[in-house]
Image (cartoon, helix red, strand yellow):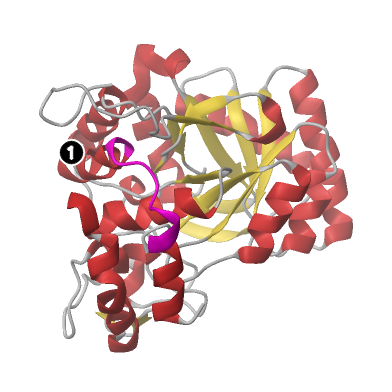
Amino acid sequence: METIDGTPAAGTHLPRTRTLGRSGIEVSALGFGCWAIGGEWQGPDGSPLGWGKVDDEESVRAVRRALDLGVTFFDTADVYGTGHSERVLGRALGRRRADVVVATKWGNLFDEESKVLTGGDDSPVYVRRALTASLARLGTDYVDLYQLHLSDVDPERAAPLRDACEDLVREGLIRAYAWSTDDPARASVFAAGPHCAAVQHRCNVLQDAPEMLALCEETALASINRSPLAMGLLTGKYMPGSTLAAGDIRHAPPAWLPGFAAGGGADPRWLARVEAVRSILTSRGRTLAQGSLAWLWARSPRTVPIPGFRTVAQAEENARTLEFGPLAEEEVAEIGRVLGT
């Protein structure tokens, strides 16, 4: 794999690839999350659910640059941009589809034309209908990892969804499946299925997830890390008083999105925590974002962080993390002492 300046990446300890749980599917140790490239979309009340305006051509260039730099895992969802993220990703991959592992999600209902989230459907019959639509948008005949996107489905209702996924595996429409949830008890329901490969959950320097990481270890699942950069707080771009555009979900953050206040400002208390560990994360030439991603690799050999991106520059910075490898044990321990975790 080449570095950003075209020279070979040095070192044999670098986590170039990891395996998605019990599936045997090999992915780059760093994946890319495709929420942001879906563009603007809204909730039923008009609240923003995207990351603001996007340039689709730049998104396509960014995906292809990531591929050139060794990123082979891309995570999207049918609801991101109400279908737009899947369409852009499919176009960007084109003939290179076989070279990558594509993950998408189902469970949310939406209107593509108005770009509005309209509800959810946790019925087993909807799984196949949603997958059929995703395959068409992605321009492919199979999905590598299919994920339930409703985090709070009743565990008793989740078992039939797991069984429906097993049917899709047998038919060759998906290779493996997972649940996107922060609840270990719910994740364990899917983990009981033979072709469950992972759980997608929130984890980052500011929001550790020891119970979920323990579950992944116990059940041999991959830990796909959503919000690995704490929705941008760990990029170093936000200062006290900075604001975000009205079309950005962080401008009017929902209850599940801490770290930002109404009006788009970053919470000063969260920024103070970032500053407290900045010097550790940026040691040995890393950027703040690169150090934050490297922390996740050090937390567990099962982690696969999926930072978002909208530009070629962001794709290059994130992909370059593969050149550094995980933080050292003493660095992780020092961060824990500073943050009191």
Left/right placement of residue 234 relative to residue 144 reads left
Residue 245 place in picture, x, y as percent: 21, 70
Q: Residue furthest bottom?
A: 269
Number of numbered discs on residues: 1
Seen at 53% across and 67% down, the residue is: 208
In the image, is residue 41 above or below residue 314? below
The answer to whether one can see residue 128 in this image is yes
Task: Say which residue appears at 10% left-offset and 29% top-offset.
Answer: 5
Residue placed furthest toward the left: 5
Residue of label 1? 312
Q: Residues within 10 Å of mark 1 (few under 14, many from 20)?
A: some
Question: Could one spot residue 258 in this view of the protein?
Answer: no
Magenta stretch, residue numbers: 322-331
Front-most of residues 65 and 204: 204
- Amino acid carrying label 1: it is Val
Image quadrant in which the N terminus is located: top left
Left or right: 182, with 60 as reference point? right
Image coordinates of residue 41 in percent, x first then y, are 38, 58
137, above or below 234, in the image = above
Magenta-drawn stretch contains 271: no
Picture quarter containing residue 201? Answer: bottom right
The residue located at (36%, 17%) in the rendering is: 94
On whether residue 329 falls in the magenta region, the answer is yes
Q: Position of residue 178 (x, y in %)?
A: 68, 43
In the rendered view, does 16 fall on the left or right side of 5?
Answer: right
